[in-house]
Amino acid sequence: MGCMFSHLAAKFAFFPPSPATYEIKKREDGKLTVVSSSSSNMSMPIPHPDDSSLDVLLIDTKRGNKIVAFYLRNPYARLTLLYSHGNAADLGQLYDLFVQLKVNLRVNLMGYDYSGYGASTGKPSESNTYADIEAVYECLETEYGISQENLILYGQSVGSGPTLHLAAKLPRLRGVVLHSAILSGLRVLCHVKFTFCFDIYKNINKIKKVKCPVLVIHGTEDDVVNWLHGNGLWKMAKDPYEPLWIKGGGHCNLELYPDYIRHLCRFVQEMENITTEIRLKKIWQNLRLQKRSDSTSTGTSSRCCRIKFCRPKCPKCPECPSLKCVNAQNVQDPVAAQIVSVGLVVAQEHITAGSMESRLVNADENACIDRWNLANILLISLCSSVGNKRK
């Protein structure tokens, strides 16, 4: 019964343009290029065949489909935007928007068509969109050397589903943008207080697993996905960024409002300037608030830090007793787990403030990295800095 409802929900969720607005051709040099579809009544700006800033890609997914992706380069970019579009558009209709975002936000941009959209093979479904975005992210890592620390995920409408699916799996992601996002597929159709097994895109559950800053953009007059969806996601985010509620904005016209690009530019600029030190301080502030509320409810005395550290055993490294590897999943304290998960980034950003030291092992890929010691040092340093400020 649940599978039948999920199948019906998918039919209501996906409306790929038919026919597609573009076609993929192979040039004499073997590279792919995009041309306007002769059978489509919609016109689209055609990229110049010799445009070196655009890569047209065919990416294999783990579910056996081949999806089309556009990668737009910006020579001044520090971050990359991975764009997941809505349910009634394809890359041909979005190319002009991609160019504007690439220039105005000063980012590299990767956009892709879901299975069954545009020139991508397969049929659109929730599970296929998850496989699609995972394949695109793997391509960004392997082909372009882009790590999650330098990646912002952007999800519009239904695209918020695969966006939050991937964001929940990437603890060191730079940021997430939710544009006219949904709480879940069923909640778009009716107001329900419970999540049913046959519901699709259960963003209401996944938003709580996202550890990076989340920007929510929603129109107050959206008659497709009510503004309450965006407001609910913003309230449940662990690290919510200042939201943008566009007064009078609908579901498909938010890009036309000046506040849209202005607010998005500010968010990207702040994400460029964010460092691991700032992220660790945010974690520490959240820990202080949590401990303060706990002490108030239980009547216990407040202390600067009540985290108990213990070095977990590492069965994989018997040859190095002085150093122990640790994974975030092995750490019982959730805050310490977050710090461990971002520990590797410290080496890249060269934190030298105060007594913070990045005690990393300079060795090959198989060497152990003492991330647990690093987490201890960072927390103790933050505790001491906060204590000095109190004095």
Image: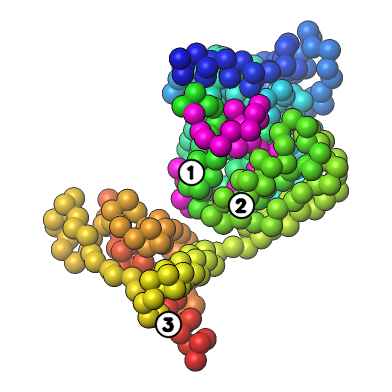
User: With respect to residue 161, does 122 lie above or below?
Assistant: above
**Which numbered disc, 3 or 2, marks the residue that appears first in the sequence?**
2
Using the numbered discs, state the Cα–Cα distance from disc 3 to disc 1 in whole angstroms: 32 Å
Which image quarter: residue 87? Answer: top right
Q: Position of residue 154 (x, y in %)?
A: 64, 41
Using the numbered discs, state the Cα–Cα distance from disc 2 to disc 1 in whole angstroms: 17 Å
- Magenta span of residues: 167-196
Q: Please, what is the three-letter code of the amino acid marked with disc 2?
A: Lys
Q: Please, what is the three-letter code of the amino acid marked with disc 1?
A: Ala
Examine the structure image and report whether residue 192 is included in the region drawn in magenta. yes
The residue sitting at 51% across, 33% down in the picture is 195
Q: Examine the residues drawn in magenta and state their main secondary structure.
A: loop
Q: Position of residue 328 (x, y in %)?
A: 34, 54
User: With respect to residue 299, does 237 lie above or below?
Assistant: above
Which image quarter: residue 267? Answer: bottom right
Which image quarter: residue 11? Answer: top right
Kindly identify which numbered label has been placed on residue 235.
2
